[in-house]
Image (cartoon, rainbow, N blue to C red):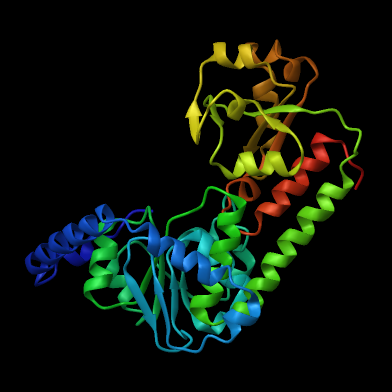
Amino acid sequence: MHASCHWLTRSGAFVLCLLCGVGVAIVLIEALRYDHRAGSAFRAIVSAPLAERLQQPFPRLMDDTHGKRLVISRPPQRIVSQTLGTDEILLAICDPQRIVALSPLADDATYSNVTAQARGIVGRANAGAEQILHFHPDLVFVASYSKAELVALLTMAQAPVWRFTDFDHLDDIKMNIRLIGYLIGEDHHAETLVQSMEHTIAQVRARIPRDAPPVRVMLYDLSGYTGGTHTTFDDMVRVVGATNVAAVHGIKGFRKISREQLLQWNPDVIITSADLGVAAETRHQLLQDPAIAVTRAGQQQRVIVLQSSFFLTVTHHIVRGIEQLAHELYRLRS
């Protein structure tokens, strides 16, 4: 998403630019003063038993991972979501009438799992601060990858902003669901959603044959990227009882690898993702790759193509990707 800069041509643009520069500097200084205790504090709050969270009255106070305090005086009624992740979680636990704007990605079926629900929300929050402030929000959700100048302008305008920073693990997803529930006063619905995730995962694990031999799998896409530790992909693989070959060989995060590494690691199964309607084509292209063709995965035609919106999501919808992975990996019956 790209920020709209048309507002810079209006009167007062020079002053706004100066303020933006100052604000960005402040944000960067705060980032350098990272406070691990603050991060641990909010994790402790949202990980507390549901009964304790329900007893916390408003105003609710929360310090983010940079030690910045957010004070929410009452349950927010004009929520703006600037990320697809918060779009998907909010639409699962919050009354739509309390959401005044979603991110534009909510409408993109390539990535979004909530396109139908999103039609009920008229507003869209592009990357421009002025456009977001036009909604008169009482809570704005952004992410660590949101532009620093956006966060700075929103902060200077005294808009209540919460930045999400952790997306690498299933536990991060659960924490973010509970955190959103806490910030908007929907703790019960948030906990129900987390419990639903855990129930689905337990059902998936129960269906995996106990005598199934260990399977060595590897993420590999048409661009040559794989995924190691500190990724939701690695967590998905662990949940279904398989071994992530890239993680075993020390890969962290997502990284491009050579064909020589692919051949040397020789996975039993290759996993990738694709948009709706092109899964078969993607699988065919990978199987035609000479490097893949000589691996055990290629020789046995074992390439699993997960739906992109289930694979790339950082929300509860990831359990649908886990279900698909287990189903195809172990050839489970529907």
Q: Is 217 rendered above or below residue 264?
A: below
Say if residue 103 shows up in the picture. no
Determine the residue positioned at 13% across, 68% down: 16
Q: Is 110 rendered above or below residue 332?
A: below
Q: Position of residue 154 (x, y in %)?
A: 28, 71
In depth, the one of 81 and 39 nearer the eye is 39
Q: Is 131 rendered above or below residue 215?
A: below
- The image quadrant that residue 90 belongs to is bottom right
Q: Position of residue 146 (x, y in %)?
A: 35, 56
Determine the residue positioned at 25% across, 52% down: 32
58 with respect to 19 (left or right): right
Q: How many marks?
A: 0
In depth, the one of 230 and 306 nearer the eye is 230
Say if residue 255 shows up in the picture. yes
242 with respect to 247 (left or right): right
Q: Position of residue 123 (x, y in %)?
A: 45, 74
89 with respect to 159 (left or right): right
In depth, the one of 299 and 242 nearer the eye is 242
Q: Position of residue 162 (x, y in %)?
A: 39, 68
Determine the residue positioned at 46% across, 84% down: 76
